[in-house]
Structure formats: structure tokens, C-alpha cells
Image (cartoon, rainbow, N blue to C red):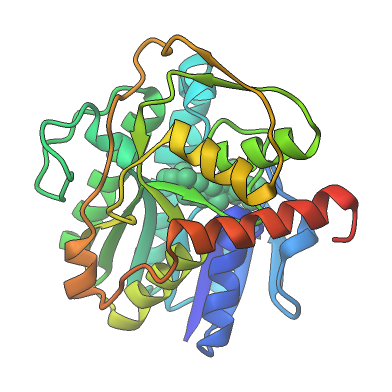
């Protein structure tokens, strides 16, 4: 079985590539290295440095003939999506439609898509399950949700299993700390650099899921060949102030945290049920937040001291 993995050089993608290789899948990656580098690309994987918007992507489908597509490449910044909605739409929605078209024309049997908890918007109840209403608030969330609709429609019209994975807040080794999503990595680096941490609010909760669990979920989705929408989450609510406390205690660094008022539009609570993925993908997260933080801290210490 051959998997075409877009965004495979990135934070989640590089872990997914490793999982797939360990399960014996042949993996081909397309990535334009917009927010990543070749550092974490697993050995021996075919790599095309290419933009998913590029029309030459079609030739990769024709020559590689993948059985499965796992589509992770994206414009991932909510803030950037609000500044450049057309760019966000092009990368996250329009390019996905093009990939779906190539997939349908070239006999791909499953299309797995990385979506986001952001599509739910303000929670009406917790934990949010897959029946929860959808109310995307940012252009990023809209572009992801629009892509979901196309994937489901392609699944109905073609012989393609449409698998949509809605990730909660993913954290772990290799996350890019220059983005807005990597709060865990950012806190660790600030503490290592003995800089002050600024926390907006602090009591707001998020559902942090470890990247290796997410990579296993992607592999399980392929192994089970299951279509549908699945939350991929820890189903655990953690306040940002508690996260900061755990990280600083584990690092034995008593850094100073400055608590500022909440930012406008910030969700107060978020936690996603992972029951459906448990039943249908036979997946559950293995990492507790404590174990996940240990591995993440170790990674950033190595990175900071230049040993990786
Ligand atoms: N990290 C999270 O907490 C989180 C949460 C929900 C959803 N997601 C989704 O998971 C996926 C992976 O995110 P990540 O956190 O690993 O981010 P990332 O930035 O590390 O990975 C994205 C990868 O896609 C590549 N890419 C971006 N634009 C591209 C383009 N036009 N053509 C080809 N490659 C391109 C980047 O170079 C990068 O390697 C994304 O679709 C993201 O929206 C992530």
C-alpha cells in the first residue's frame, strides 16, 4: 500500500510518516517546506518539494499511483487567515479540491484529512462530540470546514473513503514555536531562555493531545479504512495556568509568568470527546499529559542546547 502524505515534513506529518513506515506502508511526501525543513524527514522516503497548489502535483498522482492520500499540508495560522483569507482559502480549500479530483481520477481508495476543533466554534456543550453543531469563527476554520464538505461529497460520488480527523490542540516534539498553536513548546522555550511568560487569561481550558497519539490515529484510520468524521483528542480539559505550572515544575525552573487579560474572542473552555474514534478506529491516546510533557521538554532541551 502506498500513501501520498502532504505536509509530511511538518510537525504532525513527520510523526505520521514514521508511524506509516513502521506499519510497512510505502510513503511519498509532498511538502513545500513553508513552515518546516527536511530535518525530521524519515530516512528513505521519497520526497517532492512542491506546493500543493502547483499543477505538477497531478503528475505525482499519475507516476506514483498512491492507494491512499493523507492530506496534512495547510496554512495553519488563524491570525494569518484573517489577514489573507484568499491565500488561506486557496491552500486549505481550493488545493484540497484539486487533490480530491486527482485522487478520484487516479484510483485512490481513501482520503484522510487533517481538520480542526476550530470548526465547532463556541461550545454549546462539553465534551464536544461529532454531533455538536458547527460554527466556524475564523477564515481558517471556514476553509477547513469547506474542505470537509468537499471531501464528504467526493466520498459520495466516487469510490473513495472520506476520513476527516478533527484534531484538538496537538503538542509534542518538533512543533514549530514560531506559530501561534505551539503553546507548550513556547512555554518550554521561554523557561529555557529564562524569559518571562505572558499568559492571556490562564483559566481557559484546552484539550492537549500528544503528537505521537495523533500519528497513531492517522495510521489507524488507514488500517481500518474508516470513513466519517472523528475527533482526535485527549478528552481531558487542562487550564493554561495548570499547564504552565506543570511545565515549570517539571523543568525545575521558577520562571515568572505575567497574567494579562483574556484576548477578545478567546474560547473559555474546550474539550473534545474521543469516544467515536475509540470505537470505530480502535484508537485511544496512550500518553498522559505528564508523559507527553516529559518527552516534549526533553526534545526542546536537546534542541536548545544544539544536540539535535
Ligand atoms: N498542530 C495542531 O494543534 C493542529 C490542530 C488542528 C489541526 N491541525 C492541522 O494538522 C495539519 C498539520 O499541522 P502541523 O501542526 O503539523 O503544522 P506544520 O506547519 O508543522 O505542518 C504543515 C506542513 O505543510 C507544509 N505546507 C504548508 N503549505 C503547503 C503548501 N502550499 N504545499 C505543500 N506543503 C505545504 C508545511 O511546510 C509543513 O511541513 C494541518 O492541516 C493543520 O491545520 C493541526
Direction bottom: furthest residue: 24
Q: Left of 201 or right of it: where is 146? A: left
Residue 51 seen: no
Residue 90 seen: yes
Q: Residue at x 79, y 31 (%)?
A: 194
Quadrant position of residue 186: top right
Q: Left of 273 or right of it: where is 286? A: right
Direction right: furthest residue: 306
> Between 22 and 205, which is closer to the camera in this rendering?
205
Measured along the vertical axis of the image, is residue 241 above or below residue 3? above
Q: In which quarter of the image is the C terminus?
A: bottom right
Picture coordinates of residue 217 (x, y %)?
38, 69
Picture coordinates of residue 266 (x, y %)?
36, 20
Q: Which residue is drawn at 11% across and 41% down?
A: 132
Number of numbered discs: 0
Picture coordinates of residue 177 (x, y %)?
67, 38
> Between 123 and 148, which is closer to the camera in this rendering?
123
Quadrant position of residue 117: top left
Q: Left of 197 or right of it: where is 38? A: right
> Between 252 and 197, which is closer to the camera in this rendering?
252
Quadrant position of residue 230: bottom left
Q: Residue at x 63, y 48 (%)?
A: 175
Amino acid at each position: 500500500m502506498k500513501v501520498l502524505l502532504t505536509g509530511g515534513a511538518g510537525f504532525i506529518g513527520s510523526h505520521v510518516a514514521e508511524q506509516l513506515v513502521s506499519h510497512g506502508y510505502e510513503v511519498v511526501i509532498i511538502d513545500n517546506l513553508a513552515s518546516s525543513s527536511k530535518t525530521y524527514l524519515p530516512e528513505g522516503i521519497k520526497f517532492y518539494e512542491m506546493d500543493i497548489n502547483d499543477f505538477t502535483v497531478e503528475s505525482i498522482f499519475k507516476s506514483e499511483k498512491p492507494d491512499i492520500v493523507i492530506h496534512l499540508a495547510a496554512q495553519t495560522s488563524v491570525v494569518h487567515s484573517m489577514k489573507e483569507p484568499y491565500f488561506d482559502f486557496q491552500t486549505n480549500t481550493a488545493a484540497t479540491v484539486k487533490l480530491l479530483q486527482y485522487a478520484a481520477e487516479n484510483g485512490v481508495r481513501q482520503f484522510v484529512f487533517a481538520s480542526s476543533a476550530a470548526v465547532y466554534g463556541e461550545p454549546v456543550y462539553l465534551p464536544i462530540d461529532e454531533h455538536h453543531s458547527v460554527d466556524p469563527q475564523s477564515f481558517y476554520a471556514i476553509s477547513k470546514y469547506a474542505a470537509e464538505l468537499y471531501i464528504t461529497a467526493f466520498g459520495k460520488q466516487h469510490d473513495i473513503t472520506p476520513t476527516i480527523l478533527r484534531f484538538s490542540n496537538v503538542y509534542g516534539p518538533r512543533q514549530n514555536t514560531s506559530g501561534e498553536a505551539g503553546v507548550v513548546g513556547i512555554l518550554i522555550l521561554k523557561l529555557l531562555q529564562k524569559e518571562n511568560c505572558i499568559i492571556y487569561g490562564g483559566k481557559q481550558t484546552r484539550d492537549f493531545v500528544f503528537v505521537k497519539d495523533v500519528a497513531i490515529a492517522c495510521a489507524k484510520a488507514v488500517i481500518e479504512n474508516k470513513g466519517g468524521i472523528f475527533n482526535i483528542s485527549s478528552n481531558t480539559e487542562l487550564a493554561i495556568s495548570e499547564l504552565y505550572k506543570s511545565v515549570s515544575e517539571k523543568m525545575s525552573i521558577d520562571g515568572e509568568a505575567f497574567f494579562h487579560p483574556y484576548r477578545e474572542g478567546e474560547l473559555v473552555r474546550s474539550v473534545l470527546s474521543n469516544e467515536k474514534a475509540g470505537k470505530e478506529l480502535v484508537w485511544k491516546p496512550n500518553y498522559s499529559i505528564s508523559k507527553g510533557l516529559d518527552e516534549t521538554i526533553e526534545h526542546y532541551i536537546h534542541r536548545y542546547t544544539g544536540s539535535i
